[in-house]
Amino acid sequence: MYTSLFDAVFADSFFSPRRTIYVVSDSQLEEIKLKQRQEELDNLEASRKMLEENYQSRIKMIDEREHELQEELKALAPAEKKTELSTEETEKCAVKT
């Protein structure tokens, strides 16, 4: 059987959305608000903990890399001084001759 356009428009939930309405007492509403605030607080605390752990981990990685670079600089420093000394000695010898 055919349905009319009128029936199709009003039967379609796109044009007439159905909303569910809940009626709660004031005490239930306060309990719901309290529960929502506690969940939000728990989420914030978990986020803070995760951020702090990530921060500490990153600091550790940076400190390790900084230590590695300092060790490499110490190892390279004497070699550079020797190179500088040999260059200076070569220049002095060239000036004397």
Image: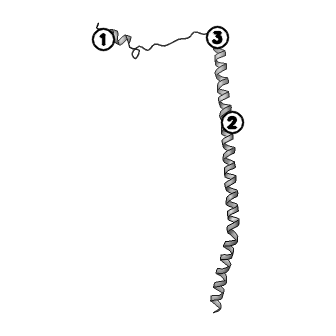
Q: Is residue 75 above or below residue 62?
A: below
Say few, some or many: other residues with alpha carbon within 10 Å of mark 3 (under 14 / 14 to 19 / 20 or more): few
Q: Distance between the Cα atoms at labels 2 and 1?
A: 58 Å
Q: Distance between the Cα atoms at labels 3 and 2?
A: 35 Å
- Residue 69 at x, y = what percent? 67, 60
| 13 relative to 89 in the view: left or right | left
Instruction: Work out whether mark 2 precedes mark 1 in sequence or the reverse, and give the earlier one.
Output: 1
- Badge 1 element: helix
Q: Residue at 65% of width from left, 34% of height from top?
A: 47
Which residue is denoted by mark 2 in the rendering? 49
Which residue is denoted by mark 1 in the rendering? 5
Say few, some or many: other residues with alpha carbon within 10 Å of mark 1 (under 14 / 14 to 19 / 20 or more): few
Q: Residue at 37% of width from left, 11% of height from top?
A: 10
Q: Amino acid at mark 2?
A: Lys
Q: Which mark is residue 26?
A: 3
Q: Amino acid at mark 1?
A: Leu
